Structures are given as C-alpha cells and as structure tokens.
Image (cartoon, rainbow, N blue to C red):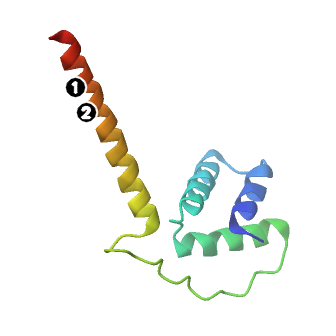
Amino acid sequence: MQLDALIRELIATGTMNEETLADLNRMLADFEAGKLDPDDEVYLRALHARLTNAPRPEPEEAPAEPDRIDGHTMAEWRDRALRAEAEVASLRGRLAGESAST
C-alpha cells in the first residue's frame, strides 16, 4: 500500500488522539514534500499493521538518497525558487508603493 494511502487510512479510523493525529498529518505533509524520514515510514507501517491486525511488512531496503544538483534536492530547489519569487513580489510591491508616493 502506498504510504500516503496508509496514513489517510490511519487518520480515517477516527481513533487517534490529538497528538498522534498531528503527527500523522505532519508525516503526510512530509511524504508529499518528499521529506519523510525513513524511521517515520517504519513507524507508520508498524502502527498500521498493529491497528489493522495485518501482518507486519518485511523491512524494505532503505530508500536511496535523492538526486542532488549542486548539493540540493529538487524539493530544496523548488523551495528556494518559491522563496525567491515571494521576495521579488515583495520588492516590486515596495517599489510600486514608493513610486506612487513621489
């Protein structure tokens, strides 16, 4: 089962306390961003197996390190680009405000 579907299934049980639910939502966001810690994956699969009485999955090989370009993963480059775009928009807004006041 895909990890995001597994997390959503755990959340949908409605049996999680607030702290565990917050952890599950954080792990789902981390998974979707490609940043889920391998230990979290092990925890999620074990928790799912325990709660659904499913047999525990065999340990999988550790995921390969994501490809890096100039020391950054694609997700890190995306985050940098988004921050740069936000900064450019902010600077343009300030410049437009200064032009209007003169």
The quadrant in which the N terminus is found is: bottom right
The residue at the point 41 percent across, 54 percent down is 79
Q: Is residue 37 above or below residue 16?
A: below
Q: Quadrant of the C terminus?
A: top left
Q: Position of residue 83 (x, y in %)?
A: 35, 47
Q: Nearer the viewer, residue 56 or 67?
A: 67
- Asked if disc 2 and disc 1 are in contact, CB closer than 8 Å, the reply is yes
Report the disc number at residue 95.
Answer: 1
Q: Which mark is residue 62?
A: none
- State the SS at label 1: helix
Judging by the rendered image, the residue that carries numbered circle 2 is 91
Residue for point 36% across, 70% down: 72
**Residue type pointed to by label 1:** Leu
Task: Name the residue: 63% across, 45% down.
Answer: 18
Seen at 40% across and 62% down, the residue is 76
Q: x, y (%) of residue 78?
A: 43, 57
Please tell me in which quadrant of the rendered image residue 92 appears.
top left
Distance from label 2 to label 1 (Cα)?
Answer: 6 Å
Name the side, left or right, on which 43 lies relative to 37. right
State the SS at label 2.
Answer: helix
User: Residue 2's quadrant in the figure?
Assistant: bottom right
Label 2: few (<14), some (14–19) or many (≥20) C-alpha neighbours in 10 Å:
few
Of residues 68 and 34, which is closer to you in this image? 68
Residue 19's x, y, as percent? 59, 49
**Mark 2: amino acid:** Leu
Up the image or down, 90 lies above or below 2; here it is above
Residue lying at the far top of the rendered structure: 101
Quarter holding residue 59: bottom right
Toward the left, the furthest residue is 102
Question: Which of 74 and 60 lies nearest the eye of the viewer?
Answer: 74
